[in-house]
Amino acid sequence: MKDYAAIGREELALQYRLKAVPIPDRRENKTRFLIIGLGNPKRGPSNKTSILFGVKDKPGALHEALLAFKRERINMTKIESRPSKRKAWEYLFFVDIEGHESEPRVRRALVALRRSTSLLRVLGSYPVAR
């Protein structure tokens, strides 16, 4: 049997005989919701782009990669690292930046980033809810 997870009301968990796990409700908690689908959302007035990249294991590699955003004056709103499953001591970085991948400055930054990374995936661009 496959494992599934959802966020919903406790009554639904009881109805479908699912295990309900409470989500901590604290003021300092921030929950991020994404709608994942096929296709590419159109560029709106305010956008973010999520990317995943890996860097070579050498001094200054992350700094060199992030310079692409500084040069194009692109704000990073999130950076998170996770150990890679491919190789010991290799890390992957999940980054959110302001802007849409169709914008020239974002395209230029991604081209520069690709040159200084061992792996680069653009996860997508999407409008930001304000």
Image (cartoon, grey):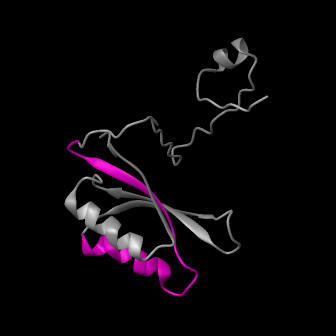
Residue 78: give x, y in percent of width and height. 43, 59
Task: Look at the image and say whether residue 65 sits in the magenta stretch.
Answer: yes
Say if 129 sits above or below 85 in the image. Answer: above
Say if 123 sits above or below 130 in the image. Answer: below
Quadrant assignment for the N terminus: top right
121 sits left or right of 103 in the view: right
Quadrant assignment for the C terminus: top left
Relative depth, front residue between 116 and 80: 116
The quarter of the displayed image where residue 90 is located: bottom right
Task: Look at the image and say whether residue 52 sits in the magenta stretch.
Answer: yes
Which residue is painted at 56% across and 42% down in the image? 26
Residue at the extreme bottom of the image, as rendered: 59
| Boundaries of the magenta span | 44-72
Say if 26 sits above or below 70 in the image. Answer: above
Which residue is painted at 66% across and 32% down in the image? 5
Residue at the extreme right of the image, as rendered: 1
Relative depth, front residue between 40 and 49: 40
Number of dots carrying numbers: 0
Residue 73: give x, y in percent of width and height. 24, 69
The quarter of the displayed image where residue 98 is located: bottom left
Say if 75 sits above or below 64 in the image. Answer: above
Residue 81: give x, y in percent of width and height. 56, 64
Residue 7: give x, y in percent of width and height. 59, 29
26 sits left or right of 10 in the view: left
Relative depth, front residue between 75 and 84: 84
89 sits left or right of 7 in the view: right
The quarter of the displayed image where residue 113 is located: bottom left
Which residue is painted at 69% across and 19% down in the image? 13
Residue at the extreme top of the image, as rendered: 15
